[in-house]
Structure formats: structure tokens, C-alpha cells
Amino acid sequence: MLAFGTAVTDEDRYAAQALPGIRRVAPPGATVLTRRGLSLPAAYNAMLDEAAAAEDLEGLVLLHQDVELHDPAFGAALAAALALPDVGVVGVYGRRGGSGVDEPGSVAVGHVLWGGPFEERPAGTGAPVEAELVDGMLLALSPWAVRTLRFDLRFAPHFHLYDRDICFQARAAGRRVLVLPTPVTHHFRRAALESRADFVEALVLLHRTWAG
């Protein structure tokens, strides 16, 4: 069973963007979870706890309420990627080829449209690609990760870098991080982001946690 989870703060955006995409790609029998009134890390941890109880769990897909998936083949491809040996986290957009907390020298992997509809839809879901980290717009956790990892609540005030932290947790445990390229629309609103100061504070926290 593949589960999908979203922290909902805007019912209209969820209903118009994330939910149609989930319905488009979810395999038969998939579970759809939501949480409201919690910080993002707390909401995600609550859904991890719920999904962890499923004996037939194939993975939990955590996606933002403004992220829309397009390829009906994505669900099956994602389940296959999550079943690969030693996989911890799979995303749709990330970075590979870097090193260290800031991943210097890394390159972007994945195809995301930031805004409205694709003028020309890219090819469907591709093969998984090894990465160092994936963007929090979509984080799919393997059964091992669902039952082992939890989001660090210290990142809750910032809305930044919780995604990098969960990838570092997986890699520190010897698990792989993958990008599964697929057409994705992120109906992005820059005004919805917190200030630059919040990003800097989150970066300081990430360094203290992982750079010694």
C-alpha cells in the first residue's frame, strides 16, 4: 500500500492542486492522509506514525498542497523505486554530485515547472537517479524510513531545510536518496515563503547538526 500525505493550510489550494494530482497517480488501494493545524514537521511526523502501522506499506509520499503530479505512471514507478535496495528517500527534484552540508559543486536533477501549466509537457516518469538531497515539495519515504526517521521539530519555525535534514538522516544510516524525474507543477507563490532571516537560521541549525 502506497500512502500520500499533505499538511493542509489552504483548503482551496489542496483541493485544486495536490489532491487532483494524487488521484491521478495513486495506485488502487492507496491511502490519502492529511493533517491540519500543525507545523509542517509535526504534521509529517504524525502521518509517519499513522503510516508506520500499515503492515503492507510500500511507502509514504509527503507533498506540499501546491504540488501537482501529472503522469499516471508515477505511482507504480515510485513504488518500484522505494523497493530498491537500501533506499531511504525519493523525490522528484534534487541535487547530486556535491559534498558537505552546502553540497558545493552539485547539479540539479528533475523537472519541475514553477507556476502554471506546461506549454509542452515533458516526457513521462524516467528512471531513478542517485542524489544527495531532494526538495521538500515531495518527499517519498521507504517503509524503513517511515518506521525509523522523523522530522526534526527544531526546523518547524523556519519552513526551510527540513528536507535536507531528513535526507542527511537517511544517508547517515547508510540509505540511498533518489530523484525520480516526472512532470510536476509547483504552483509556487514566493510571498508564501518566510523571510531570508528564517532561511539563515535554518542553515545555522543544519550546520550545527551535521557539520560538527
Image (cartoon, rainbow, N blue to C red):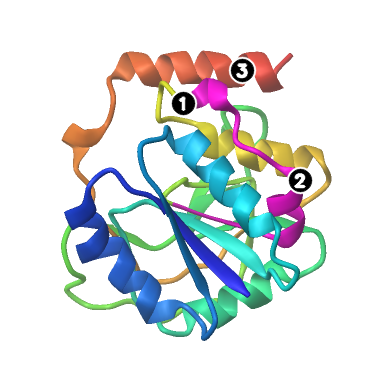
Q: Locate the C terminus and report the quarter of the image it occupies.
A: top right
Image position of 193 (left or right of 29): left
Q: Which mark is residue 56?
A: none
Q: For the residue marked with disc 3, what is the amino acid?
A: His
The residue at which mark 3 appears reads as: 207
In this orientation, does residue 88 appear? yes
Q: For the residue marked with disc 1, what is the amino acid?
A: Ala
Q: Which quarter of the figure has residue 127?
A: bottom right
Give percent across and percent down for residue 198: 37, 18
Give percent across and percent down for residue 112: 35, 60
Residue at the spot 63% in from the left edge and 75% down from the top edge: 1
Badge 2 marks a residue whose secondary structure is helix
Give percent across and percent down for residue 199: 40, 21
Q: Which mark is residue 148?
A: 2
Image position of 80 (left or right of 92): right
Question: In this picture, is 175 found above or below 21?
Answer: above
Q: Which quarter of the figure has residue 185?
A: bottom left
The numbered mark, 2 or 3, whose residue comes first in the sequence reads 2
The residue at which mark 1 appears reads as: 156
Q: CA distance from mark 2 to mark 3?
A: 22 Å
Q: Is residue 142 magenta?
A: yes
Q: For the residue marked with disc 2, what is the amino acid?
A: Thr
Q: Magenta part of the protein: which range? A: 138-155
Image position of 116 (left or right of 102): left
Badge 3 marks a residue whose secondary structure is helix
Give percent across and percent down for residue 17: 25, 63
Residue at the spot 51% in from the left edge and 35% down from the top edge: 42
